[in-house]
Image (tube, rainbow, N blue to C red):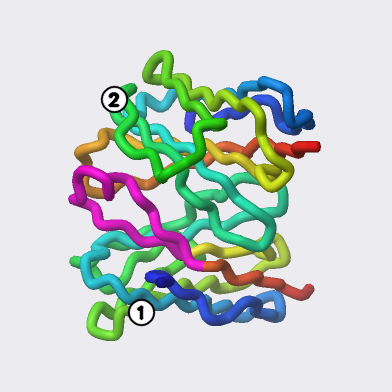
Amino acid sequence: DQQVKQNSPSLSVQEGRISILNCDYTNSMFDYFLWYKKYPAEGPTFLISISSIKDKNEDGRFTVFLNKSAKHLSLHIVPSQPGDSAVYFCAAIVSNAGGTSYGKLTFGQGTILTVHP
Amino acid sequence: DTEVTQTPKHLVMGMTNKKSLKCEQHMGHRAMYWYKQKAKKPPELMFVYSYEKLSINESVPSRFSPECPNSSLLNLHLHALQPEDSALYLCASSQEPTSSYNEQFFGPGTRLTVL
């Protein structure tokens, strides 16, 4: 049962345009969401997060939007740059879970973003 | 210092070998994690340490043995691994375990090949 889904395996965008990466979740207990970027043979790099009490969080070129009723979040990158080309993972967590659920990030399958010059 | 470091970067071992992976962070984080990542897949959680105590073991085979000697260090001892255990092993850390919002920061990983 995949609780976090990234339905687009890949996305191709022209440099300078907007990249929109989407993520859906099924577990209504998730209350904190994170985006990670990963280059090949490297560890994931934390990009931006959002709690369920907000619907938008912005950090420079990166903005994450959360639609709780639709159980959907998206990451907007604008303007996109060739260096943004990487795999992007959406992740979710039940922030106040204890016991066997503590610290358990649930990842989506990832979306490969390619930004063309 | 906002880094999680891991050594070695690459490791090749036979099925009868014993080896260890090391992870270190100096951010004062009190939760540390081991993940396994296969190609084209998301990271899979293996173990969680909270205040140097093992709090989660995701039904990992006993040939993987974690150890947390102190709040900055995390080891993963490997013994009698199988070729299917070949993967990228990632270490991560996060702030106070009881904090509500806990970004996990990942190290660069150890690329393990089991022959």
Which quadrant of the view contains residue B107? top right
Q: Is residue B25 visible?
A: no
Q: Secondary structure at mark 2?
A: loop
Q: Quadrant of the C terminus of chain B?
A: top right
Q: Tell me the residue that label 2 is attached to.
A: B51
Q: Secondary structure at mark 1?
A: strand
Q: Check if mark 2's residue and mark 1's residue have beta carbons within 8 Å.
A: no
**Disc 2 residue type (three-letter):** Tyr
Q: Residue at x 48, y 55 (%)?
A: A47
Q: Residue at x 42, y 38 (%)?
A: B47
Q: Is residue A81 visible?
A: yes
Q: Residue at x 56, y 31 (%)?
A: B63
Q: Nearer the viewer, residue B32 or A3?
A: A3
Which is in the foreground here, disc 2 or disc 1?
Answer: 2
Circles 2 and 1 on the same subunit: no
Q: Residues within 10 Å of mark 2 (few under 14, many from 20)?
A: some
Q: Chain of mark 2?
A: B
**Disc 1 residue type (three-letter):** His
For the residues marked 2 and 1, what is the alpha-carbon distance in whole angstroms? Answer: 33 Å
Residue A93, image x and y in percent?
31, 57
Q: Residues within 10 Å of mark 1 (few under 14, many from 20)?
A: some
What's the mark number on residue B74? none
Q: Which residues are magenta?
A: A90-108
Q: Is residue A40 left or right of residue A18?
A: right
Q: Tell me the residue that label 1 is attached to.
A: A72
Residue B6, image x and y in percent?
61, 29
Residue B10, image x and y in percent?
75, 33
